[in-house]
């Protein structure tokens, strides 16, 4: 990554503002750039991968994947804390952070998270069972 781009990204991250804002881009262009609020899941998925690549977070090696897995676990812990405290803002933030960390982990392991999701849905879509105490139990596990 070139030095200028890296500097813009670091400044934007530090001040929690879009790079476009720091660069003084025209309002129309900033609005176009900030369309993230209306992006599809697939567009967000690609944007997150690009964001992680821009920050050299995806290296597709075991050490990086293990570090990213630790981040996934950390985010799930924060989600649990949010649910226990009934903190809607924390829950929403933790769910989003969990998705981001899973997308990055999948990319690090050379998987596409959307492919993983499609694959598992094909397995569960016709699954039968019932919910017991708020947890879905597969039909095959009901008879054990």
Image: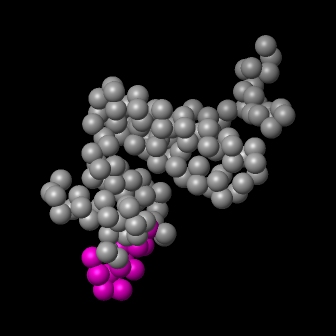
In this picture, is 137 found above or below 80?
A: above
In this picture, is 67 found above or below 79?
A: above
The residue that appears at 46% across and 48% down in the rendered structure is: 100
The residue that appears at 38% across and 31% down in the rendered structure is: 65
Q: Nearer the viewer, residue 144 or 5?
A: 5
| Residue 92 location, quadrant | bottom right
Q: Main secondary structure of the magenta part?
A: helix
Q: Where's residue 20, x and y in %? A: 32, 74
Q: Which residues are magenta?
A: 23-36
The answer to whether residue 77 is seen in the rendering is yes
The residue most toward the left is 2
Residue 47 lies within the magenta run? no
The residue that appears at 62% across and 34% down in the rendered structure is: 124
Q: Where's residue 44, x and y in %? A: 43, 58
The residue that appears at 31% across and 75% down in the rendered structure is: 22
The image's colour scheme reads one colour
In this picture, is 51 found above or below 32?
A: above
Q: Where's residue 27, x and y in %? A: 36, 86
Q: Where's residue 98, x and y in %? A: 53, 45
Q: Nearer the viewer, residue 90 or 109?
A: 90
Residue 26 lies within the magenta run? yes
Left or right of residue 7, residue 45 in this image: right
Q: Quadrant of the C terminus?
A: top right
Left or right of residue 133, residue 92 in this image: left
């Amino acid at each position: 990554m070139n030095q200028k781009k890296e500097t813009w990204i670091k400044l934007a991250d530090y001040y929690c503002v879009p790079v476009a804002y720091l660069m003084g881009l025209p309002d129309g262009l900033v609005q176009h750039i900030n369309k993230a609020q209306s992006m599809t899941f697939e567009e967000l998925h690609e944007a997150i991968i690009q964001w992680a690549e821009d920050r050299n977070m995806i290296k597709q090696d075991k050490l990086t994947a293990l570090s990213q897995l630790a981040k996934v676990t950390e985010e799930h812990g924060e989600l649990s804390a949010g649910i226990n405290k009934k903190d809607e803002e924390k829950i929403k933030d933790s769910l989003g952070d969990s998705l981001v960390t899973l997308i990055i982990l999948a990319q690090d392991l050379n998987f596409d998270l959307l492919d993983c999701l499609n694959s598992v849905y094909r397995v569960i879509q016709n699954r039968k069972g019932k919910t017991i105490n708020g947890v879905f139990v597969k039909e095959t596990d009901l008879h054990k």
